[in-house]
Image (tube, rainbow, N blue to C red):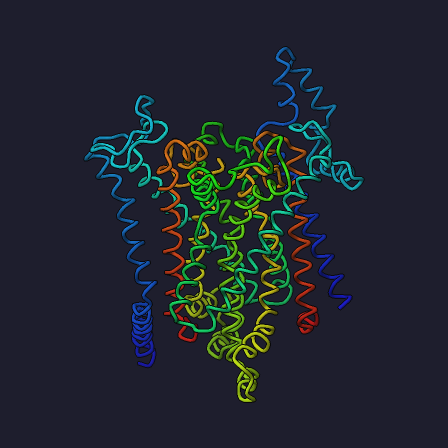
Amino acid sequence: MSATTAGALAPDTAIAGWRLRWRRFRRHRAGMVSLLVLGLLLVFVLAAWPLQTALGIDPNATDLLSRYEPPSALHWLGTDDAGRDELLRLMLGGQISLLVGALATVAGGVLGIAIGLLAGYFGGRADAFLMRFTDGVIALPLLPLLIVLGAVDLTKLGFSSEFAHSGAAAFWRVVIIIALFDWTSIARLVRAATLSVRERDYVRAARASGGRAGYVMRTHILPNIATPIIVAGTLTIGRVILFESVLSFLGFGIVPPTPSWGNMLNNAQELVTTAPALAIYPGLLIFLTVIAVNFLGDGLQHAFDPRSEG
Amino acid sequence: MGGYILRRAVQALVVLLVMSFIIYSLIGLMPGDPIDVMLSTMPNITPEQVAQMRHVYGLDQPLLLRYWHWLGAALRGDFGFSRLHAEPVLVVLGPALAQTCRLMLASFTLSVVLSLSLGVVAALRPGSWRDALIGFFAFAGISVPVFWLALVLILVFAVWLHWLPASGIATVGAGGFGDQLRHLVLPVVTLALAITGQFIRFVRASMIETLRMDHIRTARAKGAGERRVVLVHAFRNALIPVVTVMALSFGGLFSGALITETMFAQPGMGKMIYDAILGNDYNLALTGLLFATLVTLLSNLVADLAYAWLDPRIALR
């Protein structure tokens, strides 16, 4: 009887908690505007497919006779340096940039949560070692290292030459190398949160009644530290999108013909003098996306932690 | 305190050593090897001769052994020869390091001044339109892709207005001090804007927290003027955590410096490392990365020690 009551009660209170948070979030104006902007951006990048069919353009087909055309009925934002439709490439590039942002954040998040949980839950030597390791990673010059990792020849790691030079390899490589470095803030946060939750009575009770470490972490600790993880994860997405864009811009990320907002600016020095608008669009979209994500994170923080000011 | 310094220094040294091995292995995974690069100028060479050359240069030895030899040479100050510059690596590195330090220090100073003033103004009236405006500026600074910010500044101030040069460090043939200064403006502003956003948020948060403390209330109760309360009682106390965070992020400036130097064609460490990786200049890339790591670790070490000095409780842990 008591078990069913507890079981029925828990989801209800959980839902009520989330409803409360949503109500607080709705009062955060910048957060709501950001949510709207991100929704519109998502519609924008997904519109690439219908628009492509409607206009009947291949966004990867180069046409050197129609470079840098001004906007027209067929090419709404004109064409780029290889005669490709700028608008379609902005939309498709956005899909890649957002996808990299989401995937690398999830991958880095899983890594960070695992390291933070282990360090916070077990403490002692494991904690000391993992946190020194985290400090070491934080202290590294990030971008130069990402560039070296982006330059690694995959055939020397035993991959086939065909795969090593494919677009898929470039995509996954960016996701993995960013995730390899951008887990530190989540790890530290999860550790701190775990340390404070670990000593609560219900966790002690769970451990005293024989709950295994994995079980206690999964059912008692993770759900209770979920909100700071969500906030930190949101902020990570913004950072990851910036990393992807700069890597692709420098030639070590997403490689053409696959467009990304970063690599559409590869020939920026030329664009600045010949077609300034093309030098503005991709960067403006990156900026808009990242600032919206950051304001969203701010709004979430506000909604999840009533004590936080502003 | 002495023990603490020693412990931190040893930790930094261990990280540097581990990183030297990781970077060494990674450089080995870059496309091609030194022999391939040499061969591109000698088409008539036989595979046997290639194998022989690999043997002479020790490239057929296991990784650990090669690293050990490299480490021995590096500790004696021999970092090899740069392929792109045809000079010893250390000769190329010196001026580049000086250039980057100049850029980083100038941007850092500008950013500290900007963020301290804006952060305090924002913290005085949280929720006001001034606070909102400064807050938006801070978020914009955090969210802007640095390379695109550089591009926009070039577009506006160099291409359209013709006020400032877009690249280089001096006009060829006519480089006075004023001219060099004009070449520094856009890179310094770009890099400074890129970090100011984060700093403003730290300053604002720290000021707001301090203004709520008891000693501020006491100062007000004793009749101290608002100016004195803010600048003397609050600001000085709010500075302690801010100084630490700022010092800690000095090393992180290096990533921004790489982008800025590449965009504005400044011959600093960042651009040098980038060009070395693009041009298969293995020795230069390896040594450049190591020095970049060293600079970052050193500035973190200094920040840690400064923090321990400001807040003695840290060293006891």
> Residue pushed farthest right?
B76
- Of residues B134 and B290, the one nearer the viewer is B134
How many dots with numbers?
0
- Of residues A29 and A240, the one nearer the viewer is A29
Residue that appears at 36% across and 37% down: A278
Residue that appears at 59% across and 29% down: B279
Vertical order, A94 against B91 (above or below): below
Residue A112 in view (yes/no): yes
Name the side, left or right, on which B152 lies relative to A91: right
Q: Position of residue B153 (x, y in %)?
A: 46, 44
Q: Quadrant of residue A272?
A: top left
Q: Position of residue A75 (x, y in %)?
A: 25, 33
Q: Position of residue A90 (x, y in %)?
A: 33, 40
- Of residues B136 and A121, the one nearer the viewer is B136
Question: Which image quarter is the C terminus of chain A in?
Answer: bottom left
Residue A190 in view (yes/no): no
Question: Which image quarter is the N terminus of chain A in?
Answer: bottom left
> Residue pushed farthest bottom?
B222
Vertical order, B139 against A213 (above or below): above
> Residue pushed farthest top?
B44
Q: Quadrant of residue B90?
A: top right
- Of residues A111 and B313, the one nearer the viewer is B313
Q: Position of residue B138 (x, y in %)?
A: 45, 59
Name the side, left or right, on which B19 lies relative to B201: right
Name the side, left or right, on which B201 lies relative to B243: left
Vertical order, B117 against B175 (above or below): below
